[in-house]
Amino acid sequence: MRRFLFTALTAIVLFSAVAQSYTLNDLLSGKFSPRGVPSMVSSHDGQHYYQSDPQLTAVIKYAYVSGEAVDTLFSTRTARSCTFDSFEGFLVSPDENRVLLYREREQIYRHSFRASYYYHDVRRNMVRKLSEQTSKQMIPVFSPDSKMVAYVIDNNIWLTKFDFDTESQVTKDGELNKVINGATDWVYEEEFAVIRLMEFSPDNRVLAFVRSDESAVKEFSFQTYNGQLYPGYHRFKYPKPGEANATVECRVFDIAARTTRIMDLPVDSDSYIPRITFTDDPDQLAVMTLNRYQNRFDLYFVNPRSTVARLVLREENKYYVDSEWINSIHFLGDKFTYVSERDGHSHIYLYGMSGTLQKQLTTGNYDVTALLAADRETQTIYYEAADESPLRRNIYRVDISKGQARKLSPQPGYNTAAFSESGKFFVHRWTNAATPPLITLHDAAGKELRTLEDNKELRATLAAARLPQKEFITLPAADGITQLNGWILKPANFNPAKKYPVVMVQYSGPNSQQVTDRFGTAWYYALLQEDIVVASVDGRGTAARGEAFRKSTYLHLGITGSDDQIAAARYLGSLPYIDKDRIGIWGWSYGGYNVLMSMSRGNGIFRAGVAIAPVTDWRFYDTVYAERYMRTPQQNNEGYRQGSPVALAGQLQGSLLLIHGTADDNVHFQNSVEYTRALIQAGKHFDMFFFPDKDHSISGGNATAYLYEKVIGFYKENL
């Protein structure tokens, strides 16, 4: 559950006492959505980038400095033996002499997909299929010298050597729902956001990979209807809290000798390996592990030939180690970076290759929210921080030797950046709550080179539409001490002498954030047209306010979060223009879970609620997410019980609309089925709607518009 957001379609929020009308369709169709820029894939040297043309017929190389095209690496119109007119995506080798194109993409889960890949030899201008196998390929990765590419077919690793025009099979034990080589299972993809665990050594001599054995993991299945006379089934391995996880091994394939070795890692049998990568030294494979409870992170350097592992860095935490910071490790010759929360906030630390702490690069009562890039040549680190306010972000660079940080983002608001290889250039995106994104290109020193997108046309559209503006507020948490951040949206014809109903839109999950000084709107602007006020409050457990705030929900998911939404509802009900007897709440995924918890623990303060795709008992969710915050049910049975909407069904108060997709592979339809069973047993009446064969996003076809029309109609009727 990687912080599933509101499925928001962004737009500006300009206030006027008199507003032109707009419709739900305007909000969902993209009329008020900002323009972005096409993805810019950095070259290996960081001086150029690649993009496909708008028709997806060519891969073009551009210079960052000028933005001018300098070469066409591939074109369907000129490449010899090219059998297709367009492609869906591409991958360029480090030396730019080879391009992989893919077509016929088949989505697997949230990030992973398989496709038919084609290999283009730039020098010969020749195209052929990457593999002669009948099945499609996954997660290709080039060797550093660009002479080989490894990929996965049906859970096995294959290797193509371009100079010899050969394809060989590296592993042979891969099998669906049993053994995975190089790729990852459902839970790694969803909770660690990793789909490839397969890397070449810097000297191109070995290929390291993780082998996952999910034979002991129990299988989950759901019916798929799709208009068939006899429904089918989708089956996959899904580990639930306290149940068996896949076992993992790190292995190394010696390319010349064609032998495979198992690395001797001193880890528990149920540990995780969410990342592997080589250091600059081909004899040092960095293997990063988490124990099952995710409160201990270990970094090992493993010799791929002797298989001996050496512990370099260990971090233990009384709560859990945030796995996202595993990707903050960058190797810079004789040192590496890591982000830790050891001083109460997330900050950047520098270590020697022996594991000795050299220095803390950032300090202060704020969180570093992303380590963006590391330039080994200039010994410079680039990062994002919530130093000005939890609602805002700034971009900085810090010199490793001097330890001096310099701000690269000139305007206050929400600043984000995407860097080229080694941080030579970056695409900067600036916005605030009243301004659509301004996207510019900068060099490493922060100098603006050119504007990529100013959203000028959208600004004119928004000025004419005059949508209401978010008003930021602070309010007390349930403990009466902590101050929470929130915003309020009022109808355009707002009358302070009138009493309005209010709908609270929230997510509330660990390390999530909905209240930011960032341009955006969504379906709920349509509620304003119905004379309904909309508000959002980030309770304790959410992001960018230090470790104690962020991890305050540990072992007790649903309790503090619902307490704070209840306290926020009481605060809103005390405002002179809010009708305290007409308060609603809305949420999706974790947000839907918190709707049910809040309506069950709020003593009737919520008159109506909509819960979409909610978890209804953490025993139904996956191991990595649930156990990170709750441990196992065997260790924390009372925490699971207290945080279970199923167990609290008899306490539900208010009108409820429950919505779920029947093909949700993330938060299974089982959650709503068992919650329905509990409500029936408790004699609680409610409304429910399901979307046939829709996954966690409930999108595609007319589903999105239909869903929000139903939600808005529900609030009109029940508030």
Image (tube, rainbow, N blue to C red):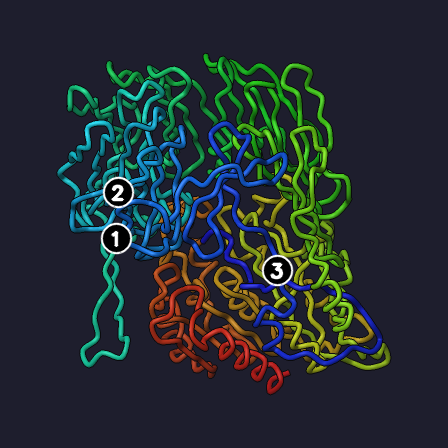
Residue 360 location, x and y as percent? 62, 21
Q: Which mark sits nearer the N-terminus, 2 or 3?
A: 2
Q: Residue at x 33, y 72 (%)?
A: 693
User: Left of 79 or right of it: where is 544?
Assistant: right
Q: Which mark sits nearer the N-terminus, 1 or 2?
A: 1
Residue 471 location, x and y as percent? 78, 62
Q: Assign a secondary structure to mark 1.
A: strand
Work out whether residue 607 or residue 112 is closer to the camera in this orientation and state it.
Answer: 112
Badge nearest the viewer, 2 or 3 = 2
Q: Which mark is residue 325?
A: none
Residue that carries the numbered disc 1 in the rendered image? 237
| Neighbours of disc 1 within 10 Å: few (<14), some (14-19), many (20+) | many
Work out whether residue 683 or residue 712 is closer to the camera in this orientation and state it.
Answer: 712
Residue that carries the numbered disc 2 in the rendered image? 246
106 up-or-down from 199: above or below: below
Residue that carries the numbered disc 3 in the rendered image? 563
User: Left of 411 or right of it: where is 614?
Assistant: left
Q: Whole-Å distance between the Cαs marked 2 and 3? A: 36 Å
Q: Assign a secondary structure to mark 3.
A: helix
Q: Are marks 1 and 2 in contact (CB under 8 Å)?
A: yes
Q: Whole-Å distance between the Cαs marked 1 and 2? A: 9 Å
Q: Quadrant of residue 655?
A: bottom right
Q: Amino acid at mark 3?
A: Asp
Residue 476 location, x and y as percent? 74, 56
